[in-house]
Amino acid sequence: MQSKKISSGKSNVERTFVDVARRAQLVDCAIDAIAELGLPKASLAEVARRAGVTKTTIFYHFANREELIQEVFASTLRQGGEFLSARTGRAASPAAELRAYIEANVEYIGAYRKQVKVLTAIAMNFTDEDGRTRLTHNASVYGVSLAPLQDLLERGQRAGEFRDFTTRTMAMTIRATIDAIGPQLSVIPDLDLDAYAKDLVDLFRHATEKERPS
Amino acid sequence: MQSKKISSGKSNVERTFVDVARRAQLVDCAIDAIAELGLPKASLAEVARRAGVTKTTIFYHFANREELIQEVFASTLRQGGEFLSARTGRAASPAAELRAYIEANVEYIGAYRKQVKVLTAIAMNFTDEDGRTRLTHNASVYGVSLAPLQDLLERGQRAGEFRDFTTRTMAMTIRATIDAIGPQLSVIPDLDLDAYAKDLVDLFRHATEKERPS
Amino acid sequence: MQSKKISSGKSNVERTFVDVARRAQLVDCAIDAIAELGLPKASLAEVARRAGVTKTTIFYHFANREELIQEVFASTLRQGGEFLSARTGRAASPAAELRAYIEANVEYIGAYRKQVKVLTAIAMNFTDEDGRTRLTHNASVYGVSLAPLQDLLERGQRAGEFRDFTTRTMAMTIRATIDAIGPQLSVIPDLDLDAYAKDLVDLFRHATEKERPS
Amino acid sequence: MQSKKISSGKSNVERTFVDVARRAQLVDCAIDAIAELGLPKASLAEVARRAGVTKTTIFYHFANREELIQEVFASTLRQGGEFLSARTGRAASPAAELRAYIEANVEYIGAYRKQVKVLTAIAMNFTDEDGRTRLTHNASVYGVSLAPLQDLLERGQRAGEFRDFTTRTMAMTIRATIDAIGPQLSVIPDLDLDAYAKDLVDLFRHATEKERPS
DNA sequence: GATGAATGAGGGTTCATTCAT
DNA sequence: AATGAATGAACCCTCATTCAT
C-alpha cells in the first residue's frame, strides 16, 4: 500500500479487499460532496467527514487530492459509459440509433443526477493555472466524446437516411443540448424528462431527416 | 459611504463620481480575473492586484466578496441584454424573430467571450451550501430568462407559423444549445461561429416550422 | 505592503516604519528559534509564538518561510561582516592582518554565539532536494567567503612575510578552524576563547611565517 | 522481540539472524538516505522505501526513529574507529603518530564521505528541544573523542618532541580542522585531499615542533 | 477615499507512530 | 517477521475580512 502512492496506475489486482472498498467509499463520499457543494468546496476534510475517517486516511489511499478527483471522474464516466452502451448497442438503423442515443442519454441524466452534476463540476473547475483542463481523459464538455456520435451521423448520411449537414456541428449541437439538461435540472428539479426526451427526439428527427418529396 | 456596507442597494445617485468609477474598475478587473482564472481562483487579492489597489479598497466599495460577484454578474448580464435587445427588436415575423434571436445570441457569444465565460463561471460556482444558486437575478442557466423566448414561440404558434410543440421545452432546448457554445469555445477556440449559427437557425427552423402539405 | 509579496527585492525606503520594525522583530524571533531549536524545528508557528503574533502575520511581512530564512541569513551575515570589517581594516602588515583576522573572528564567535549557530544551522540545512544550497549569497561553509582571506595570504607571500604554501588550502584550513569553534562552544560553553584565539594566532603564525634562517 | 521496544539495549545474542540482518539493512538504508537528503528529510517512509519494506517493519526492529538514528550514528562511529585504529597503532614517535593521525583521518574522510556526511548531519541536527545533543555517545563535534588525541600530544611534550602549548586547545584545533573537511567536500567535491593532508601535516608540524635552536 | 497591519478559519500535505492481524 | 490500515499533530500557506488611521 505504501509504494502505491508513487504511482496510482497500479492494477486493481494488487489491491486488498479492504483497500478497494475504502477507495470506493471515499470516491462515493467525494461524489456526494462535489455534487452538493461543488468541486472547490469539496475539501478533503469534508470528504473525510462524510466517510467517517481522518483526512490522513485519504492520503493513505490516494496520492493527493488530484488523484481522488481523477478517480471520481474516471469511475463516474466509466459507469455512465456502461449505462449508455447497454442501451444503445443494437439499433436497426442510424435514425433509430440516434433516437436511442438521445433517449438513453436523457434517461441517464435523470437517473444519475448526482453523477451528472459531478461530471459537470469537475469538467468546469478542474483546470490548472492556465485554464486548461487537468483531466486525463479525452472528453468533450463534461467527458463524453463526440466521435461516436459524429460517426453515427455520418453513417446515417451514407445510408441515405439523413440529409446533408455538417456532422461535426450537428453532433456538437446534440451533445450541447443533452449536456445542458443537467444544469437545468438543478434549477427545475421536477422537469418532465420523458417529455423533454420526446421533444429532443422529435427535434433532431426534423433536423436530420431527409426532406420528404412533396 | 459607510451605510453602503449595510445594504448594497444604493442608487447610483448617492455615489460620488470617484466611487462609481472605482466600482466599475473593480468590476472590470474582477471580470478579467474570473474569465482567466475561474471564479474560485479569482481571489480578492488577485482582483486588487489587477486594479492596482489594496484588498481593503475593495471592502470600501463592496460589502464583501459576494456583493462584488453579484455586481459582476448583474452588470455583465445587463450589458448582454442591451446587446441582444438592440439586435432583436423589429422582426417581421416570429420565424424571423427566432432566427434573429439565435443569430444575435451566437454573435454575442463570439464577440463577448470573456463575459460569457464569466457568466458561466459564476452561474456554475456561485452556489449555496445546499447547492442552490446564490444569484439574486432570475436567470436560466447563466442568466438569460426563458420567458421572452417562450413568448416568442407561442406567438409563432398562434400566428400559424410554427407547428404544435411544447413551447417551454422548445425554449429550453434553444437556450441550452446556445448556452453550451461558450464552454465549447474554450475547448475549440477556432470554432466557426457563423457556420454554427447557420446550422442552428436551420436546425430550429426544421424543428419549429409547420410541415408543408404534400 | 501587499504588492511586496510578489518580489521581496523592494528597497527599504518603500517600507513603513512599523513594517520595518515588525520584519526586524520577526527576524529576531526567527534567529532565536533557529539557534535554540535548529532550522527544521524552527517552524513559523514557533516564530509567531515568540513574536506574539499569528502565523499569518508572518506571511504579511514575508512572502514565505524561505524569504524569512533568507532574510535571517542575510542580515546576520551583514551584521557579522560589519563587525569584522570594523576590526580588521587597518593592519600594518599581512602578518598583523592575519592575526587581526583570527582574533576578530574568534571574538565574533564568542560575542555572537547565537548568530553563529544560526548561520551554521541555515548553511547546513537550507538545501533543496538535490542537496544543493538554497542560499542566495555566495558563501563558503556557512557564509564567509574565502576570497579575502586567500588574497591576504597571497599578499603576505608576495611581501615576503609568509613562506611558500598553497594559499587556497591554507585559507580553507584557517576558515575551517574558525568555523569549527561554534559547534564546539555548544558542547563546551565555558571554553576560554581568548586562549583559543591566542593558540590559533600562534599556530598559524608558525604555519605561515618564513622559517628563520639558522 | 516484543520487549525490545521497551529497551533498545538488547545484546546481539538475543537477536535472530534475520533480525540482525534486517537491522543492518535498515541502518544501511538510513545512512544512504541521511547522506543524500539530510537528517530532517530522511523520513522513515524514505528509509523503508529504500529497504523495500514497509514503514511498520522499521518499528518492529527499532523502538522509534530516534533509536534507528542512534544506531546509525553508533555503528558509523564504530566503523570509523576501527578504520582509524587500524592505521594509527604502531608509530615510532609521537610526532610520527600525529602525522599518522592526521593522514588517517583525512584518508577516512576521503574514503567514507557518505559516513562523514551522516555523522555531521546527525551531530548537527539531532538535538533536544533545549538545543543539547541527544547523542548517547560521548563525542566531540561529530563523534570522535578528543581524549586520545590530547593524550598523544601530552606524550609528545613529555618526550621533548613537541614544544609547550595547551594540549587541549591544540587537540581541539586539530580535530576542528579535520572535521571541517567533510562539509567542504560537499561544496568542492574535487578537492585534492592528499595535498590537503600534506598541508595539514606540515601545518601542525610547524605548530607543534620544538623550535630548532638557531 | 484608501491603506497598513493583523487575524481566524481553513486549505492540502507529511510525519512518526499504533494496533490488529 | 512483517504488513495493512489508520491516526493526531504539525507543517506551510491562502483566504476573506476587520479595524484603526
Image: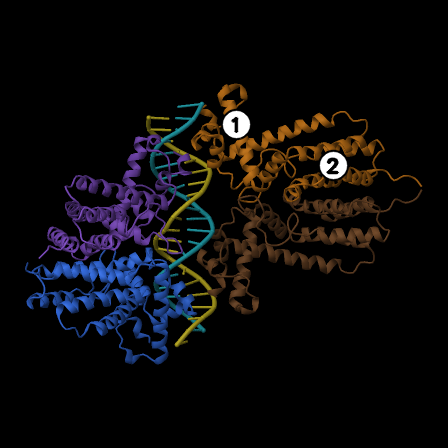
Chain colours: A brown, B orange, C purple, D blue, E cyan, F yellow
Q: Position of residue A54 (x, y in %)?
A: 44, 57
Query: In terms of depth relative to the viewer, which is nearer, E4 or B205?
Result: E4
Query: In terms of depth relative to the viewer, which is nearer, C210 or B28?
Result: C210
Q: Chain of mark 1?
A: B
Amino acid type indicated by mark 1? Gln
Amino acid type indicated by mark 2? Asp
Q: Position of residue A46 (x, y in %)?
A: 49, 51
**Residue at the spot x=5%, y=60% of the render?**
D213
**Where is A137 relative to D82, above or below?**
above
The residues bearing labels 2 and 1 have C-alpha atoms spaced at a distance of 32 Å
Mark 2 sits on what residue?
Answer: B194
Mark 1 sits on what residue?
Answer: B25
Disc on the earlier residue, 2 or 1: 1
Q: Residues within 10 Å of mark 1 (few under 14, many from 20)?
A: some
B57 with respect to C49 (left or right) = right
Q: Nearer the viewer, mark 2 or mark 1?
A: 2
Q: Position of residue B156 (x, y in %)?
A: 81, 32
Q: For the N terminus of chain C, give its image quadrant.
A: top left
**Circle 1: element type:** helix
Query: In terms of depth relative to the viewer, which is nearer, A197 or C174?
Result: C174
**Circle 2: element type:** helix
**Where is C187 relative to D4, above or below?**
above
The tag on residue C202 is none
Query: In terms of depth relative to the viewer, which is nearer, C77 or D113?
Result: D113
